[in-house]
Image (spheres, rainbow, N blue to C red):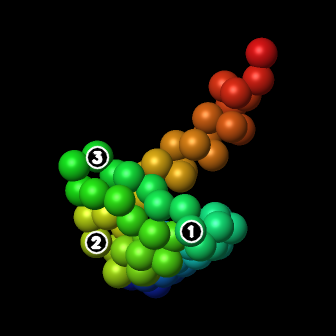
Amino acid sequence: MSNNKKTKKKSSTITVAEDIKELVKARLSTLPRNVSVSIGSEGAFSRDELIEHVEREDEIGEKMIQVDMEFLRSLKEGEFYE
């Protein structure tokens, strides 16, 4: 029985990760096509390139997920309101 709980928890974690990835991709898709985003020394990326990186979950994609989630957490905490 405890093995089923582990399986359900792992499945739930995967679902949450996929939901977050889909959220970040959806938010990126609202950027205009002609906008490029500079990611430190990695270079500049178009909207569609960033979405591809998030989909592949590579280093750039993980960074975009991290940045977007931190932005949303800050927004939730009211850090942008005075």
Instruction: Reply above or below: 18 against 20.
Output: below
Query: What secondary structure is marked by label 1?
Result: loop
Amino acid identity at mark 2: Asp
Crowd tier of the residue under label 1, counting other residues whose Cα lies within 10 Å: few below 14, some 14–19, many 20 or above: few
Q: CA distance from mark 3 to mark 2?
A: 16 Å
Crowd tier of the residue under label 2, counting other residues whose Cα lies within 10 Å: few below 14, some 14–19, many 20 or above: few
Query: What secondary structure is marked by label 2?
Result: loop
Q: Is residue 5 left or right of residue 61?
A: right
Would you say the residues marked 3 and 2 are in contact, meaning their CB atoms lie under 8 Å apart? Answer: no
Check residue 40 in the rendering and tell me which mark sits there, or answer none: 3
Residue at the disc numbered 2? 58
Of callouts 3 and 2, the N-terminal one = 3
Instruction: Reply above or below: 31 against 22.
Output: above
User: Which of the 4 image quarters holds residue 43?
Assistant: bottom left
Question: Residue most toward the top?
Answer: 82
Viewer-proximal residue, 44 or 16? 44
Of callouts 2 and 1, the N-terminal one = 1
Q: Is residue 60 left or right of residue 34?
A: left
Residue found at x 70% / y 27%? 80
User: Which of the 4 image quarters holds residue 56?
Assistant: bottom left
Viewer-proximal residue, 10 or 53? 53
Residue found at x 38% / y 52%? 38
Query: What secondary structure is marked by label 3?
Result: helix
Q: Residue 71 at what x, y percent from top left?
A: 57, 43
Check residue 42 in the rendering and tell me which mark sits there, or answer none: none
Residue at the disc numbered 1? 34
For the C terminus, the quadrant is top right
Q: CA distance from mark 3 to mark 1?
A: 19 Å
